[in-house]
Image (tube, rainbow, N blue to C red):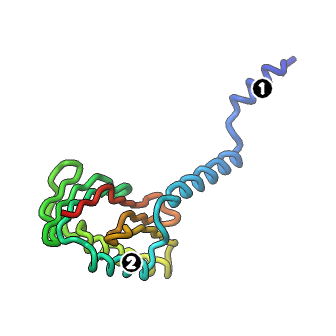
Amino acid sequence: MNSPLASSAEAARRPLPVLGIALFALVAGGATLFFLLRGEGEPLTLPALEKARALWAKMGPRDYDLSVRVSGAMSGDHAIVVREGKVVSMKTGGVDAAPTAWAYWTVPGMFDFLAEELTRAGKQGEGGGETVLHASFEPVYGYPRSFLRHQVGDRQSIAWDVTAFQPR
């Protein structure tokens, strides 16, 4: 005769039913997406981008130092020095970055990147999965403070955050 204690120990060793595993995966995936998308920023729109670009054109300095943390496909910390509107040095993880990457990391280059993302998301929406784009813009100068792109159904996202901005 089996004791109640032996039955509960035996039940604890049995694998979870498939339905339980599927439910756990669904909840975990939803929670991951919620925490990924709950960050700073609103959905990126062309009017918001153009408003920020106009503010930068009016208020943005030509000389500044910028620190950006990128996560996702090409993660790393970037330290960028811009003088007269052009990158004069850039380090990624403390190592000199290739000059071919520099143009993307001026504020106007970041605006261009966001515009390209909006265009790409519109084209993907015509036949592919939905692309979620979020961004926030700094209220005084207008530079992009944060960006997130998440392709629904894809595990790979990309995000960046400006961690420091110093006008010179």
Q: Say which residue appears at 48% left-offset and 62% top-offset.
A: 154
Query: Which numbered tag is attached to residue 102?
Result: none
Using the rendered view, name the quadrant where residue 159 is placed: bottom left
Quarter holding the N terminus?
Answer: top right
At label 2, which amino acid type do we have? Leu
56 relative position to 14: left or right: left
- Residue 128 visible in image: yes
Q: Which of 111/5 is in front?
A: 111
Q: Is residue 100 visible?
A: no
Q: Circle 2 is placed at which residue position? A: 49
Q: Disc 2 or 1, which lies upstream in sequence?
A: 1
At label 2, counting other C-alpha atoms closer than 10 Å, the crowd grade (few under 14, some 14-19, many 20 or more) is: many
Where residue 146 appears, as percent x and y from the top left, is 39, 63
**Image quadrant containing the C terminus:** bottom left
Q: Label 2 to label 1, Cα distance in Å? A: 60 Å
- Where residue 152 appears, as percent x and y from the top left, is 52, 66
Q: Is residue 121 left or right of residue 34?
A: left
